[in-house]
Image (tube, grey):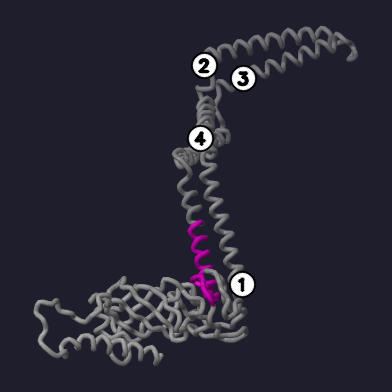
Amino acid sequence: MNNKRALRALYFLVITALLFLPACSQGTPDLTEEPNSGIPEDFQPIVSATGIVLPSKRVVLSFSTPGIVDEIMVEEGEVVEKGKILMALKGREQAHAALETARLELILANQSLDEVHRTSALISAQTQLSFANAQDALEDAEYNWRVQQEGNRASQSTIDSAQAGLVLAEEEVDRAKGNYDHYSGRPEDDAQRAMALIELSSARSARDAALRRLNWYLGYPDETEQSVLDAKLSISEAELGVAEQNWERVKDGPDPDTIERAEARVAAAQAHVKAAEAALSLLVLEAPFAGTVSDVYSQEKEWVAPGQPLVVLADLQTLRVETTDLNEIDAARIEIGDFATTTFDALPDIVVDGQVIYIASKSEQGSGVNYKVIIELNEIPEKVRWGMTAFVDIEIES
């Protein structure tokens, strides 16, 4: 480090001497000759600063909840991918089981919602059929109620026909009775007597049926029959009302109430999944990016507090240099994109080109007024390590 600073000091002394040599020369200069400034034509002004090699992405990980370290899944120096679980607290298994249960319920809820949409056409057709059947049932109930009221059971021609049928039936009874009387004195096992008795019984049955038919045409329901008719009519009317409401809900698509319930179930399941994920995330440390585990500050079975540093993760593939002593005068002369060369105290033979990618808008805390400048390296030499001291020369406009 001292050799490097000595070489820089010598370099600036030579430049200063070249600037003052013409002024100290003897004799009168030839005014016809072009003046010689003494500055090399290829001179490039630079700003120099010391810096440190740091990863572009680095983080110290900790839990936000207290607990006992159940398992450490990584070792120092291990390269991990983004999302890799680095450390876990006790209770992780129960939290993971709760998350799986919540995810299963979400799957079932989504399936139920899909089923509602998928079967809506079938349900609509079935509901329409039920509505039509309810209309038919009401028409039948109204007809039965109406035709069984007094004076509505039959037309006059039907009544006249029934009366004529009764007269004929009575005449048939008289004829059959006379025929039976002719054979009634014979023994019971006499065939002609038995045939006459059968004819008489049939005639009487036909007459009784004709009489009941005529009486029904001319009569009206009793109190019990009327109550039954009224009840059947009311039931049919109520069933039609329900069927119509059901049809109105589904005729233009799935039932809104069913959809609302299914969607509410999905929303609740999604909320449970998020809550379970949040609960599980409190118990595990995951790598926020791909990188290398540089430090592990805990061990298994150890109690840890919220915010306690546990794992340091860094992306060592994107090392860069951050200055530590660039003063305010030099910082004002630098611009984003300026070319820079970097050397390393531990590796004096290695020179790496790069460019300025960041200039702090606020001075750093500490002695003096210094600003942090970040140099992106065009390549990362194999031997360069995080934390090495670096020397940066930034080319600026003259």
Q: Position of residue 283 (x, y in %)?
A: 55, 76
- In the structure shown, which secondary structural element does the residue marked by tag 2 occupy? loop
Query: Residues under labels 2 and 3: Cα distance?
Result: 13 Å
Q: Rate crowding at label 1 as few (under 14), some (14 to 19) or many (20 or more) other CA atoms within 10 Å.
A: few
Query: For this view, does 158 lie left or right of residue 332?
Result: right
Pointer 1: what residue?
94
Ranked by sequence position, the earlier of labels 4 and 1 is: 1
CA separation, marks 3 and 4?
Answer: 39 Å
**Magenta includes 277?**
yes
- Residue 347 visible in rendering: yes
Q: Residues within 10 Å of mark 4 (few under 14, many from 20)?
A: some
Q: Is residue 187 left or right of residue 251?
A: right
- Disc 4 vs disc 2: Cβ atoms closer than 8 Å? no
SS category of the residue bearing label 1: helix
Q: Secondary structure at mark 4?
A: helix
Q: Callout 3: 10 Å neighbours few (<14), some, many (20+)?
A: some
Q: Which residue is mark 3?
A: 213
| Left or right: residue 227 compared with residue 321 | right
Quick one: 3 or 119, which is closer to the camera?
Answer: 3
Q: Earlier in the sequence, mark 2 or mark 3?
A: 2
User: Tag 3, which secondary structure?
Assistant: helix
Disc number placed over residue 128 in the picture, else none: 4
Amino acid carrying mark 4 in the image:
Gln
Mark 3 or mark 1, earlier in chain: 1
- Give the image location of residue 15, x and y in percent: 26, 85
